């Protein structure tokens, strides 16, 4: 077992479509990530933060092999990421990515079939698929809805359904892109408990969010990006308690100036 699962070494990525198009159309080039060096260890609970356009979604898609870096190296368990078809299939069985919109991931006729799809494609036996699917549905509080079509579920339940589909693969690294967006407080608390259970079992979790309160309550570490660069990576509570730093990264609005104090002698009557 490697304590370090994933490592970025001086990784860069530019839009549109990486180096291929940005070299042809340099005026369109936009650096999404620049010289990023960072590691994710087993059992990590990392909140990935940054303003819009900071590079959070790009980072997650590079972790999962959906994007290819323009520069630098990405290592999985100490070896360069294998980008062959079989290599990416193995990687994605261990690195699960939950997109922000659950409808990007739900497609089957019933919830059970949707969650079982990943394990089935891993070549597992029917009993193994059933056990994984039932556990994932139970973790996400969806067992009683397993026979329903996903499209009849509420937005929050579809988010949990998409998460269950990723969890059924039993990934060693779980990546979540804005999972709290659109959730009510009860659903957020439920998600937090699921993530705490996974981390306690040794799963590494990286979660992008703008919800500082959620990040402070759940994360052990905060990884903060600003304009594609890593500006902080460390203890979450300490990193997220510096208001001036958060404002500089586009994570918190500056506090409004207080109204001037009443003139002396003009107190309330």
Image (spheres, rainbow, N blue to C red):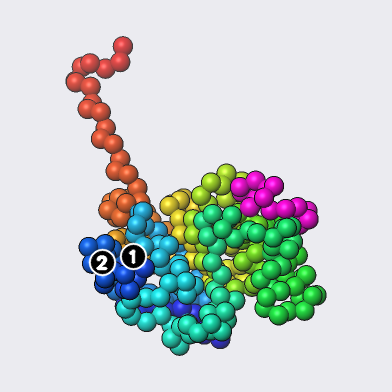
On screen, residue 3 versus residue 121, left or right, reads: left
Q: Residue furthest top?
A: 269
Mark 2 / mark 1, whichever is N-terminal:
1
Q: Range of the magenta residues?
A: 143-158
**Residue at left offset 78%, top offset 70%:** 130
Q: Mark 2, mark 1: which one is toward the viewer?
A: 2
Q: Which mark is residue 24?
A: none
Other-residue count near label 2 (Cα within 10 Å), few / some / many at <14 / 14–19 / ≥20: few
Other-residue count near label 1 (Cα within 10 Å), few / some / many at <14 / 14–19 / ≥20: some
Cβ atoms under marks 2 and 1 closer than 8 Å: yes
The correct choice, above or below, for 141 with respect to 66 in the image is above
On screen, residue 9 versus residue 220, left or right, reads: left
The correct choice, above or below, for 141 with respect to 261 in the image is below
Q: Quadrant of the N terminus?
A: bottom right
Where residue 189 appears, as percent x and y from the top left, is 59, 51
Residue 167 falls in image quadrant: bottom right
- Look at the magenta stretch and give its main secondary structure: helix
**Residue at left offset 26%, top offset 72%:** 23
Where residue 117 appears, as percent x and y from the top left, is 69, 68
Q: Is residue 152 magenta?
A: yes
**Residue at left offset 34%, top offset 59%:** 54
Please tell me whether mark 2 sits on a helix, a strand or a loop.
loop
Foreground: 243 or 96? 96
Q: Which residue is mark 1?
A: 16
Q: Which residue is mark 2?
A: 25
Residue 29 falls in image quadrant: bottom left
Q: Residue furthest front?
A: 24
Q: Is residue 85 magenta?
A: no
Where residue 35 appears, as percent x and y from the top left, is 29, 74
Where residue 260 appears, as percent x and y from the top left, is 22, 27
């Amino acid at each position: 077992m490697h304590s370090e699962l994933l490592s970025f070494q001086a990784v860069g990525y530019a839009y549109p479509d990486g180096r291929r198009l940005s070299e042809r159309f340099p005026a369109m080039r936009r650096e999404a990530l620049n010289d990023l060096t960072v590691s994710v260890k087993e059992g990590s609970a990392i909140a990935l933060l940054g303003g819009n356009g900071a590079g959070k979604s790009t980072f997650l898609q590079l972790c999962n092999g959906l994007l290819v870096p323009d520069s630098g190296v990405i290592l999985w368990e100490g070896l360069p990421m294998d980008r062959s078809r079989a290599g990416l299939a193995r990687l994605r069985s261990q690195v699960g990515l939950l997109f922000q919109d659950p409808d990007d991931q739900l497609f089957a006729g019933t919830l059970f079939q949707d969650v079982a799809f990943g394990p089935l494609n891993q070549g597992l036996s029917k009993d193994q698929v059933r056990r994984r699917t039932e556990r994932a549905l139970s973790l996400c509080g969806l067992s009683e809805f397993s026979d329903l079509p996903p499209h009849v579920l509420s937005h929050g339940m579809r988010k949990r359904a998409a998460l269950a589909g990723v969890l059924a693969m039993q990934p060693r690294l779980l990546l979540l892109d804005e999972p709290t967006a659109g959730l009510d407080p009860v659903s957020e608390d439920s998600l937090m408990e699921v993530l705490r259970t996974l981390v306690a079992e040794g799963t590494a979790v990286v979660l992008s969010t703008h919800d500082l309160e959620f990040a402070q309550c759940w994360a052990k570490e905060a990884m903060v990006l600003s304009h594609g660069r890593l500006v902080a990576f460390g203890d979450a509570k300490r990193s997220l308690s510096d208001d001036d730093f958060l404002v500089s990264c586009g994570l918190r609005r500056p506090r409004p100036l207080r109204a001037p104090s009443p003139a002396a002698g003009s107190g309330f009557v």
